[in-house]
Image (cartoon, rainbow, N blue to C red):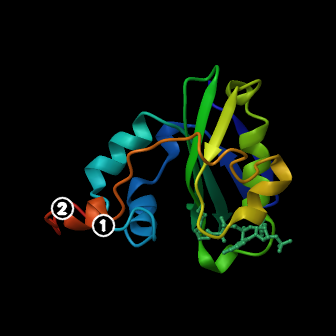
Amino acid sequence: MSFERHREDFTVSTDPGRLDVHAIHAFLVTSYWAEGIPRELLERALRNSLCFGLYERGIEGERQVGLARVITDAATYAYLCDVYVLPELRGRGLGTWMMERVMEHPDLQGLRRFSLVTRDAHELYRPFGFTEIASPGGPMEIVRPGIYKSLPHDPELS
Ligand SMILES: CC(C)(COP(=O)(O)OP(=O)(O)OC[C@H]1O[C@@H](n2cnc3c(N)ncnc32)[C@H](O)[C@@H]1OP(=O)(O)O)[C@@H](O)C(=O)NCCC(=O)NCCS
């Protein structure tokens, strides 16, 4: 069952059927972390994640204005990524409100580890208990920055 919360004209929902893949792709394809991501790859990622869509109700209906994607086993571990709010709506607490909804989700309670990587938005996450890595010598990773930029671009798919 999906999870839904409201504030003024805004809704956070985990209903996968409500996600606007076109709108999400339009934002993420130019983001610094997922630049060039192919749409079909994004669709697969969304399908296999717990996604918190942020929606605004307006006179012309509803539009997707943000996202937080959580990759998780819903028991011990979660990884938060693809967090954004559209530029025209930033700075009015919506990112924080969306994060509050993520942190209260029933599948994300009692985890042994909740991770994320950010270039400059540390202050968004700090109030929720995220800290810099205490033992930076511990975590290991395979990281491929710019991986999508090397893929052939098919304008039909983006
Ligand atoms: C990060 C982001 C989601 C925040 O959304 P928002 O609705 O503006 O967030 P809020 O209004 O709730 O601000 C919460 C706090 O986040 C921090 N913050 C917000 N945007 C920030 C940014 N671009 N860089 C650094 N810190 C930021 C500020 O500390 C802010 O607190 P303050 O208002 O008391 O100064 C939004 O700026 C965004 O979409 N940025 C581009 C995408 C991105 O960088 N995402 C994060 C990837 S890890």
Relative to 5, say whether 119 is above or below: below
Quadrant hosting residue 5:
top right
Q: CA distance from mark 1 to mark 2?
A: 8 Å
Quadrant, the N terminus: top right
Badge 1 marks a residue whose secondary structure is: loop
Disc 1 packing (10 Å; few <14; some 14–19; many ≥20): many
Relative to 50, say whether 146 is above or below: below
Q: Nearer the viewer, residue 117 or 27?
A: 117
Q: Which residue extends farthest top?
A: 75
Relative to 4, say whether 33 is above or below: below
Residue that appears at 50% across and 38% down:
16
Quadrant hosting residue 121:
bottom right
Quadrant hosting residue 9:
bottom right
Horizontal side, residue 131 vs residue 16: left or right: right
Quadrant, the C terminus: bottom left
Q: Which residue is mark 1?
A: 36
Badge 2 marks a residue whose secondary structure is: loop
User: In x, y percent, where is residue 53?
Assistant: 59, 50
Residue that appears at 45% across and 70% down:
31
Residue that appears at 41% across and 36% down:
47
Q: Nearer the viewer, residue 6 or 27?
A: 27
Q: Which residue is mark 2?
A: 151
User: In x, y percent, where is residue 2?
Assistant: 63, 30
User: In x, y percent, where is residue 140?
Assistant: 48, 41
Horizontal side, residue 56 vs residue 33: left or right: right
Q: Nearer the viewer, residue 129 or 1?
A: 129
